[in-house]
């Protein structure tokens, strides 16, 4: 469906002033509920959200290791629900209601979460070093208060 057609330059200015919501008036694509223009707008927005966020879990500079990323790719909502709620069964695709094509699966039949990829303790060790350095500074400060003298500065 065409909203209107123009060929001269003055009409071009009017097209630039159109609200993007006009794309909702477009005929839906086959098998979709929205038209090509709105599909492109949504796809562009989601792509920018994903690639523009350096903390997004799939981003190459994310804090996750490759093993952690692989684990996240394998986990389903059904796994998460069974692991965290007192459920006995969930739909195979937990985003959809149970049906003949989406049967219930027993929670005991789902793979058990292996959290070993998150066992890395290097961050904890770094935090302990910072904390012990802070404690050392506190001791020096208390001694300065007692004696009234400033202690010699040492690098920690």
Image (cartoon, helix red, strand yellow):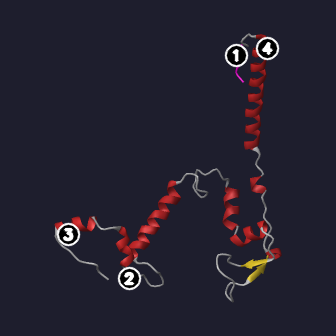
Say which mark, if any, is on residue 153.
Answer: 1
Residue depicted at x 66% and y 65%: 73
Query: Residue at coordinates 71% horizontally, 62% vertically from top-left?
Result: 71
Q: Are marks 2 and 1 in contact (CB under 8 Å)?
A: no
Q: Which mark is residue 11?
A: 3
**SS at mark 1?**
loop
Q: Is residue 13 above or below residue 143?
A: below
| Between discs 1 and 3, the one toward the N terminus | 3
| Above or below, 25 relative to 148 | below
Q: Nearer the viewer, mark 2 or mark 4?
A: 4
Alpha carbon separation for disc pair 3 and 4: 82 Å
Q: CA distance from mark 2 to mark 4?
A: 80 Å
The numbered mark, 2 or 4, whose residue comes first in the sequence reads 2
Which dot, 3 or 4, sits closer to the camera? Answer: 4
Question: Few, some or many C-alpha atoms within 10 Å of disc 2 (few <14, some 14-19, many ≥20)?
Answer: some
Task: Please give the residue where the numbered disc 4 appears in the rendered image.
Answer: 146
Question: Which stretch appears magenta?
Answer: 152-156
Q: Which mark is residue 27?
A: 2
Q: In which quadrant of the rendered view does residue 137 lie?
A: top right
Quote the CA–CA distance across marks 3 and 2. 22 Å
Earlier in the chain: of badge 2 and badge 1, it is 2
State the separation of the CA atoms marked 2 and 1: 73 Å
Question: Dominant secondary structure of the magenta stretch?
Answer: loop
């Amino acid at each position: 469906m065409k909203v209107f057609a123009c060929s001269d330059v003055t009409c071009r200015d009017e097209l630039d002033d159109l609200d993007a919501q006009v794309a909702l008036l477009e005929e839906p694509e086959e098998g979709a509920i929205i038209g090509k223009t709105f599909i492109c707008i949504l796809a562009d927005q989601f792509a920018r959200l994903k690639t523009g966020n350096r903390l997004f879990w799939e981003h190459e500079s994310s804090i996750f290791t490759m093993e952690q990323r692989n684990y996240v790719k394998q986990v389903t909502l059904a796994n998460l629900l069974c692991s965290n709620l007192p459920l006995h069964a969930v739909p195979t695709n937990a985003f959809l209601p149970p049906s003949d094509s989406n049967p219930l699966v027993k929670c005991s039949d789902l793979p058990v979460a292996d959290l070993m990829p998150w066992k890395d303790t290097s961050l904890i060790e770094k935090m302990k070093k910072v904390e012990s350095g802070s404690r050392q500074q506190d001791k020096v400060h208390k001694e300065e208060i007692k004696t009234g003298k400033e202690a010699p500065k040492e690098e920690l």
